[in-house]
Amino acid sequence: MSAPTPERSPRRGMCAAVLSLEAVTLGLTTPVMIKVADVPTGVAVGVGLGLAVLCLLIAGLLRSEWAYALGWLVQLGAIGLGFVIGLMFFLGTVFALLWATAYLLGRKIERERAAAYAAYDEEGS
């Protein structure tokens, strides 16, 4: 009887999904900053699209543990964007909560999966 093969990381998948959706939201803040908050176009593009691209880059780097720390920093940046667009205090907090849930739940699933594999290996030997 062969041991089951490890599957993809649920934490990585869930966190990447949150970052991808957050990238869309952050990208859409660019025209809002220009038209509503009167932020200069260059600054708005740099901040809005910069954070969106950063989300997508980090989503691709989640194979490395240090990328999760960058994900937490993006959450702070999204909330901090509330000083420019008030609604981002709310949206940034929502995404930070989604990120925290994906991160913590994913870690729990990974721990439980590792324990199940260890028990399976012990049972088989």
Image: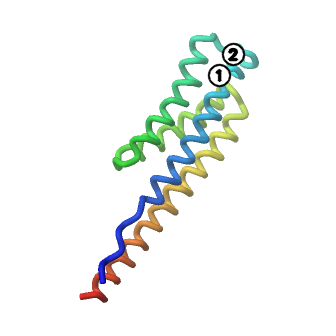
- Residue drawn 44% across and 35% down? 57
- Asked whether 110 or 86 is in front, the reply is 110
The three-letter amino acid code for the residue at tag 2 is Ile
Position in image of residue 79 (x %, y %): 60, 37
- Pick whichever, 3 or 74, lies toward us: 3
Q: Secondary structure at mark 2?
A: helix
Quadrant where the C terminus lies? bottom left
- In the rendered structure, the answer to whether residue 60 lies left or right of residue 120 reads right
Give how far across and how far down residue 17 sits, in percent. Answer: 55, 48
Q: Residue at x 31, y 77 (%)?
A: 3
Compared to residue 86, the image places residue 7 above or below, namely below
Pointer 1 with pointer 2, Cβ within 8 A:
yes
Q: Residue furthest left?
A: 125
- Is 83 or 108 nearer to us in this picture? 108
Tell whether 1 sits left or right of 26.
left
Residue 25 found in image quarter: top right
Q: Quadrant of residue 70?
A: top left
Mark 2 neighbour density, 10 Å: few (under 14) some (14–19) many (20 or more): some
Estimate the x, y position of residue 54 in percent, counting from the top left. Answer: 48, 32
Q: Which mark is residue 46?
A: none
Residue under pointer 1: 30
Q: Quadrant of the N terminus?
A: bottom left
Horizontally, residue 69 falls left or right of residue 52, namely: left
Which residue is tagged 2? Answer: 34
Q: Position of residue 63 (x, y in %)?
A: 36, 48
Mark 1 is surrounded, within 10 Å at the Cα level, by few (under 14), some (14 to 19) or many (20 or more) other residues, namely many
At 56% from the left and 24% from the top, the residue drawn is 49
